[in-house]
Amino acid sequence: MTATPRTASGLLVLAGTPIGDVADAPPRLAAELTGADVIAAEDTRRLRRLTQALGVTTKGRVVSYFEGNESARTPELVEELVNGARVLLVTDAGMPSVSDPGYRLVAAAVERDVRVTAVPGPSAVLTALALSGLPVDRFCFEGFLPRKAGERLSRLREVAQERRTLVYFEAPHRLDDTLAAMAEVFGADRRAAVCRELTKTYEEVRRGPLGELAEWAAQGVRGEITVVVTGAPERGPEELDAAELVRRVRVREEAGERRKEAIAAVAAETGLPKREVFDAVVAAKNAGEL
């Protein structure tokens, strides 16, 4: 395969910013803020406060780049890059692209053969994992769950048997509903940790079973939230009779899943062959029970 020749001389820099304590800013951040031709910031006011705290003066043009204008502004920034500009992308906290604006710009820059690099910085995901006390050798990041209750439950069911540790972001006013939904789907005894206001003055890590954490959150919680949930325990096939298999399929169908998908999901969650679940459903249908 022949390498594609580079056609652009610009550089896109993704820079991590503090998730709380400004002293955590990576040393290179100040230099990038000073040297950038264009700074794309999720919130220009927060950028101004950050530069003041770091004692640096920006020389480049500052533009806003947030969820509402990300699609429209991306082509403009790519043209700046193609024409040789050094563009710095910063979000309000943590690394761009990780549940923050950035993915579209990176993808568009790569498409135009623009070089992309990063200034590694603080990450709420990794910080929460490290503090959780839960297994961290394998994990997956799920971002924010859907706001609607039904969609949230469906998303959680998709990973109910995931053995890797799960990491979520959540808004404080939805935390109690989310933890209650997790307790319903994962089980009230599943271990978890709620990490609040990481690296800030009122940092708190609350650890315990999901059921207990849901009760605690119902009293009201404030601040930036990251939730870490231990993965599903490894287990062999369950000893379930045909009636229970049919019941589980019916529950999923009532939640909106197609029968084929429901059968596959029940087989996956029980560790049983798909054919065994299918046969139980067919027998129930022939007997007029489904």
Image: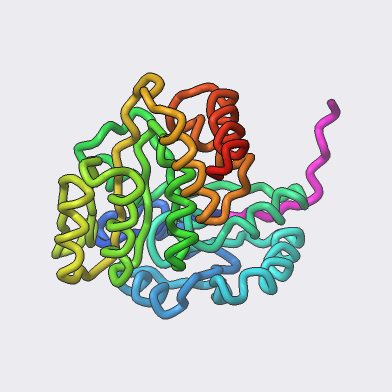
80 to the left or right of 21: right
233 to the left or right of 269: left
The image shows residue 219, relative to residue 161, as above or below, that is below
What main secondary structure does the magenta stretch of the protein show?
loop
Residue 15 position within the rendered picture, expressed as x and y whole percent measured from the top left: 47, 55
The span shown in magenta is 1-12
Depth order, front residue of 92/145: 145
Task: Please state, as top left, top right, bottom left or bottom right, where the N terminus lies in the image.
Answer: top right
Residue 231 position within the rendered picture, expressed as x and y whole percent measured from the top left: 34, 35
228 to the left or right of 242: left
Q: Can residue 131 be seen here? A: no
State the residue at coordinates (55%, 50%): 253
The image shows residue 268, relative to residue 12, as above or below, that is above
Q: Is residue 3 magenta?
A: yes
Q: Can residue 210 be seen here? A: yes
State the residue at coordinates (46%, 30%): 242
Residue 264 position within the rendered picture, expressed as x and y whole percent measured from the top left: 57, 34
Residue 68 position within the rendered picture, expressed as x and y whole percent measured from the top left: 58, 76
